[in-house]
Amino acid sequence: MSWSALTSVVRRHLLPPPKSRLLSHFPVPELGLGFSGSSPKPSPPPLRPSDDADALARLLIHHHNPFHPLESSLQLAGIRLSGDLVLQTLLRLRHASKVALSFFVWARDHAHHVHGADAYDLMIDMLGKVRQFDVAWQLIIEMDQRGVAGPTPRTFAILVRRYIATGMTRQAVRAFDDMEAFIGREPDVDDFNMLLDTLCKYGYSKVATEIFNKRKFKYEPDEKTYTILIYGWCKVNRHEMAQKFLKEMVDRGLEPNVVTYNVLLNGICRRASLHPDNRFDRTIHAAEGLLEEMQGKGIEPDVTSYSIILHVYSRAHKPELSLCMLRSMKEKGICPTVATYTSVIKCLASCGRLEDAEDLLNEMASNGICPCPATYNCFFKEYHGRKDVDGAIKLYKKMKGMGSLSTPDVHTFNILLGMFSKLNQMEIVNELWNDMVESSVGPDLDSYTLLIHGLCEKQKWSEACQFFMEMIEKGFLPQKVTFETLYRGLIQSDMLRTWRRLKNKIEEESLKFGSEFHHYHFKPYKR
DNA sequence: GACCAATCCA
């Protein structure tokens, strides 16, 4: 059966689409946790390519249905997709959390290859993202009872990360303490490091330090533990605290290694202001001092150390120094990575030296290093600045033909959308938009904003309005300027019917999802 | 998963 035939079968069984898919309203579904021992039926292994999973996922999102009718549709079609594959696809796509949970429950109960701990971990991560921690815990308990090789320490790492990302640090620590009862052993240093690392990554260095001081006698802290804490304090720009832990580390008889020094180096360079030149000089001086200190201890700088310095050169627009350092690191036998090359290329491109940047791009290729989208985006930014349409289109076409590591990302599209919209080439904007939707990397809030602003500038009010409503439906909250520009345009050109439709839409959404839209004012606009 | 790159609409 062809995909289009399957699509029509599925559609026939589906309920009408929902009115909205915003995430802030997320009713807990009936999980049916009292599963009655009915052993899962064995199902054949996945036979279909991931394209089908992708298409199915899109269809599911589009209709947003309960899945019972779908099961028969799938059986009718004789297709058995791997549940894990569809689940992963759903979770990759934006705003599909509710659909993903329904699918997970359905697939679990119908044994479509969703019994593994991986699927549970994916779901728990997603539930944490939308703050449904009670449901996440239900799944953890279910994992335990079902014996699906979990929950594992990784499951708890995911849960802990989600708690911390939400700012619920106390609950994160409690979850960490609850882990022992599930995994059947005491947490070790690595687990402890995970907790501290996650706290520090999200800026809770103070909480991490408190936990560390309370428990450092229970776990044997190692180099990683201290490096994590030093990273945390550097991140919040508290260098004196970073130094304090460096000292404590040495006092304990632990030797700082190259990673520890790179963390300190990045702490010096990360947000240092480089304007005017004497500030740049001061930063470089401090960085060189640290490099000397580490070399004095017999630790040689590695790619990361060089990449950190190169990033400073790039931010300060010093192409000569950049190239010089790249050369000297190669002479020392240190192989540049994508990050290294991207920093230098960004520096050259932003200084207008596109030919030199292209040379480096070729050098990367001959060294077998695959450029990432960020590498190409440096060129696009410069083309944008020069209004070089041909250059941009040529590079874009080249990227489209490349492997998945180098295909355009959201930023690529956003740069190009902004460029061609400003140059008034709306056919190309349209084409880019379609490419972006097709490749499922976007659109994001910026893409919508760029497109709508572009359309407003061209006075294409009804098109702009259409995209405005689409973005609301997808759960993006448009900026105030976007709303006001559109509002003014619709009123001034007497498009009152379109305006009313837009107004109803916003009122409908804000009724359901609370105060999010309150900064839009509906006062009649004075002409 | 102890460190390095990465967007710019008013």
Image (cartoon, coloured by chain):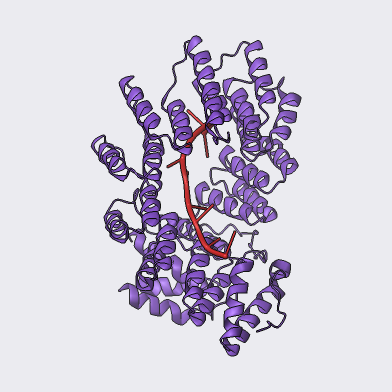
Chain colours: A purple, B red
Which image quarter holds the N terminus of chain A? bottom left
Report whether A36 appears left or right of A321: right
The correct choice, above or below, for A174 with respect to A460 in the image is above
Report whether A502 appears left or right of A367: right
Residue A323 location, quadrant:
top left
Residue A498 location, quadrant:
bottom right
Does the image show residue A342?
yes
The residue closer to the viewer here, A94 or A386, is A386
Residue visible at 58% across and 54% down in the picture: A126
Q: Position of residue A41 (x, y in %)?
A: 46, 59
The residue closer to the viewer here, A508 or A71, is A508
Q: Position of residue A189 (x, y in %)?
A: 61, 25
The correct choice, above or below, for A52 with respect to A324 in the image is below
Q: Position of residue A423 (x, y in %)?
A: 39, 67
The correct choice, above or below, for A26 with respect to A287 in the image is below
Residue visible at 59% across and 51% down in the picture: A124
Residue visible at 39% across and 56% down in the picture: A384
The correct choice, above or below, for A177 with respect to A420 in the image is above
Q: Position of residue A147 (x, y in %)?
A: 57, 46
Residue visible at 58% across and 57% down in the picture: A37
**How many marks overall?**
0
Report whether A81 appears left or right of A455: left
Does the image show residue A113?
no
Which image quarter holds the C terminus of chain A? bottom right
The residue closer to the viewer here, A291 or A386, is A386
